[in-house]
Image (cartoon, helix red, strand yellow):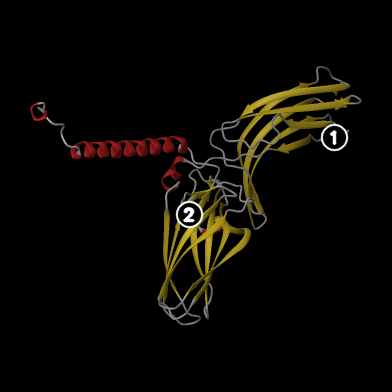
């Protein structure tokens, strides 16, 4: 008998879980005839693994087990009937979110394992999705204008002058599906006209060949030798092109909208096995020259830890400023009013 008689159902099937959440699962075993088995075990596990040159490196991050049923006789048979087993487990507080790429993945899953006499153990599994909020270290770049400036050399072969590009975004942290405006200033001190600017979102994933006790917060400065690390890139969504005509030796300012593709759901994170992030690439199209690129490093996530507390502090500060301005105006108005006449002057 295969394991088609066993089903795994999550109590909240469409939920995306956060570290520290409680996950409820129900395992149903339907036996139309006795099933040969010593035991039925539930396993909850999360693991991370990377692949380089067909060599997979596996790291088990957490595991919990629960014995659902065990034979009480030498017959080793689970009787006929329908058996429901409910189990709840709490996810660890520090785990990497779900990610499934060609060269690396983080998997969270529930496994039902049946131990049968004189046969290999049979397994059936079902994955669930884990995401995470960005850490408090991202608060300084959350809901604050971010500025990128770059001097780009124009010209097809030889330099034909410099293009000073400035990009200002309302934050460095965004959500999948979010639309925002980027203020673009192009100071064209070259002899070539600027035609357009294209925005494209790329993922940038940095992998370790082996698990490291300390994650790489900056994947561009990994301490490992090249043989022990590697990178992969992937594009999300379509290229968004906007006309930004700037004649030679002039300056142009533009407000360009961009929408984070909805499929960019994996949040930015760093673990001992990999660092996952995003690059917003601006391609500047120049007449008679190669395409010039500028890379804006951004972070994607469903929010930032401590953002509610930060909002309260900002709101409190704004209210205090408004109250101070109101008080100052009242004092100024009081000083401008004439004093009432004395009693003697009225007689």
The foreground one among 347 and 195 is 347
At 50% across and 53% down in the image, what residue appears?
298
Residue that label 1 marks: 4
Q: Position of residue 199 (x, y in %)?
A: 55, 62
Within-10-Å neighbours for mark 2: few <14, some 14–19, many 20+? some
- Quarter of the image holding residue 28? top right
Image depth: mark 1 or mark 2 in front:
1
Furthest residue toward top? 72
Q: Secondary structure at mark 2?
A: loop
Q: Residue at x 59, y 58 (%)?
A: 232
* Helix, strand or loop status at disc 1: loop
Residue at 66% of width from left, 25% of height from top?
Answer: 88
Q: Read off the residue under disc 2.
A: 222
Rendering coords of residue 78 (x, y %): 85, 22
Q: Earlier in the sequence, mark 1 or mark 2?
A: 1
Q: Is residue 34 visible?
A: yes
């Amino acid at each position: 008998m295969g394991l088609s008689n066993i089903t795994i159902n999550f109590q909240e099937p469409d939920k995306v879980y956060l570290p520290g959440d409680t996950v409820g699962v129900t395992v149903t075993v339907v036996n139309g005839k006795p099933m040969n088995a010593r035991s039925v075990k539930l396993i909850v596990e999360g693991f991370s693994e990377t692949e380089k040159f067909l060599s997979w490196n596996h790291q088990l991050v957490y595991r919990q087990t629960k014995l659902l049923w065990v034979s009480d006789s030498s017959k080793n048979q689970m009787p006929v009937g329908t058996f429901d087993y409910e189990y709840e487990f709490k996810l660890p507080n520090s785990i990497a979110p779900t990610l499934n790429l060609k060269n690396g993945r983080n998997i969270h899953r529930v496994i039902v394992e049946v131990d049968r006499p004189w046969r290999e153990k049979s397994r059936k599994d079902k994955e669930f999705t884990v995401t995470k909020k960005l850490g408090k270290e991202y608060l300084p770049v959350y809901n604050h204008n971010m500025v990128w400036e770059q001097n780009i050399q124009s010209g097809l072969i030889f330099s034909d002058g410099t293009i000073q590009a400035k990009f200002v975004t309302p934050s460095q942290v965004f959500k999948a599906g979010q639309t925002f405006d980027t203020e673009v200033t192009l100071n064209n001190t070259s002899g070539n006209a600027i035609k357009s600017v294209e925005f494209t979102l790329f993922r940038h994933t940095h992998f370790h060949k082996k698990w490291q006790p300390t994650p790489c917060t900056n994947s561009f400065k990994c301490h490992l030798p090249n043989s022990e690390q590697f990178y992969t890139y992937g594009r999300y969504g379509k290229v968004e092109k906007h006309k930004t005509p700037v004649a030679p030796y002039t300056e142009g300012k533009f407000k360009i909208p961009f929408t984070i593709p909805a499929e960019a759901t994996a949040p930015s994170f760093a673990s001992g096995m990999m660092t996952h992030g995003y690059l917003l690439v601006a391609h500047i199209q120049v007449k008679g020259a190669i395409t010039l690129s500028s890379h804006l490093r951004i972070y994607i996530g469903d929010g930032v830890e401590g953002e509610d507390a930060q909002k309260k502090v900002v709101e409190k500060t704004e209210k205090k400023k408004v109250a101070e301005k109101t008080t100052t105006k009242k004092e100024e108005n009081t000083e401008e009013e004439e004093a009432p006449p004395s009693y003697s002057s009225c007689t």
